[in-house]
Amino acid sequence: MELQLNKETVYINEVLYDGQTEQGVEFDYVLPDYYPDIFKVLKCTLTPRVASHSVSGSQLFLEGAAYIRVMYLAADSKKVYCVDQRYTFSKTIDLGKNADGAVVTVTPKTDYVNCRAVSGRRIDVRGAVSIKVKVTAEKSADIITGANGDGIETQNDTVSYGGEKLNAQEIIIIRDDIDLGTSKDGSAYLIGAEANVTASEHKVIADKVIVKAEVTVKAIYAINKDNENDLALHTMEAVIPVNKIIDLKGVTEKHTVFVNLSVLDIDLAPKPVSDGENRVFTCDLSLDCKVSAAVDTEVSLVTDLYSTMFDTDFLTWNVKAQSLPKLVTEQLILKSSLEGTEDNIAEITDAKIETSNLVFRARGDGELTATGQAVFTAIGKYADGTPAMLERTEPFEAVIPVLGIGEEYSVEGGVQVSHVTYNITGENRVDVRATLVLRAAVYNIVNLTTVKDITVNTEKPKTKDTNYALKLYYAEDGESIWDIAKRYNTGAAAIISENDLSGGIVTDPTMLLIPIN
């Protein structure tokens, strides 16, 4: 009987690209006539966002913007004036191979920003942003799980892994109007805005995943009153519900599903109402929704083989697959003390935290560390009415208990801000406490080492001893029946059957009957 190979498809999560791209920002701005002259620049921020991304063939296209905000004071005034501009950019990254259907993860951050008032009417901003990009795709490989014919004997090992990883990614666009109410007279202008999204639950039905989430939008704004020269800051918070059906062909209730949501872009702009004043903000949001699913799958690997009839050679290869994910949800508490540049902080209107450079690493047995940078900021005013803008950057490290992390692993996930509290603890000090929620999926790398190619040399048959039907062999405790069968050029199953053994390892020293084919 000629050699026949049994094959099975296994699935591998391949990293197609893991790098970053940079974008410089040069912005020269002349104030409109209705803006007062610049007396003092209070703060300049540069916030990068990636509004959309798409893959075509071997190229990744990014569409982004760097939001520039300059806050300043005019002469003899404590009112904060804001200059908001949007610096758009496009990026194309060559991935080196076809990546249609790949999953794209983008993480933008500000590298630096410098701002100076060239004159009372002109602002010069220089900065740079970078975008970390990771592109992964599911690919398949056929491995040998068995062989028949030409006297082939195979040793197999059954291994569990995560099977075919189902992936879906969709950018969710949301537009909503947020009403500030009618209790505050005058026009509102924005000082700062942020958004955080949290997936509350998901449900699997008929090749689809229903994702429910909430986006919390926070803003700090001022009311522009012609008869006032003081700083009057207010905060606004709104919760926008999200319900989205994500197509994920093949997903069932048996799958382990991981939903990873992040805010790609937020644009909050005042919208005049009927009386001409700005008491409504139009909110445009872009959310990146990634859904993955895996199910426990067993595969039988051929780890060794020989032929009882012919000389045989074979090659092995190692396929790196992923295990089922270990889903992690952990609450993190970060604290910092911010100090003002002047004495006597009278009030704090709002405080926030932003994180960047998040890195996951395993440490010891059963621990996963998350490290990164946290920027704490607070805004308010001093006793004399001048604005107080406090900021501090600190590294953070959180240790998360996760049992069973292997030597090789990969992690998908991120952190979202849950809530921030603050307290004035001294004349010029503010303590900020932030609660963050970390969600991650931890995959162990499963090494599937198996036979790749088999060569049976039918021109070199093995010499058989036909003088015996059985041989006696004294086996030691712990010996492998496979090794004994290979040594005597017979079948392991035949030895087990002849000696009425219960497994493939000798448990006690004993005399074995070896059938000779």
Image (cartoon, rainbow, N blue to C red):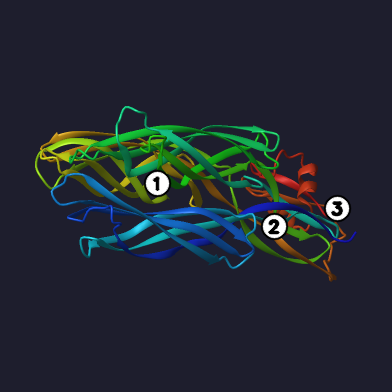
User: Horizontal placement of 219 versus 54: left or right?
Assistant: left
| Above-or-below relation of 431 to 38 | above
| Above-or-below relation of 466 to 237 | below
Disc marking residue 469? 3
Q: Nearer the viewer, residue 472 or 270?
A: 270
The amino acid pointed to by label 3 is Ala
Residue at the spot of label 1: 364
Pointer 3 with pointer 2, Cβ within 8 A: no
User: Horizontal placement of 303 versus 388: left or right?
Assistant: right
Q: What is the quadrant of residue 499 in the picture?
A: top right
Q: Can residue 161 be seen here?
A: no
Distance from the alpha carbon under mark 2 to that under mark 1: 33 Å
Image location (x, y in percent) of residue 254 = 66, 34
Distance from the alpha carbon under mark 3 to that under mark 1: 55 Å
Q: Can residue 282 be seen here?
A: yes
Q: Residue furthest right?
A: 1
The amino acid pointed to by label 2 is Ala
Q: Name the quadrant of the C terminus.
A: bottom right
Image location (x, y in percent) of residue 461 = 84, 68
Residue at the spot of label 2: 141
The local secondary structure at tag 2 comes to strand
Image location (x, y in percent) of residue 51 = 49, 52
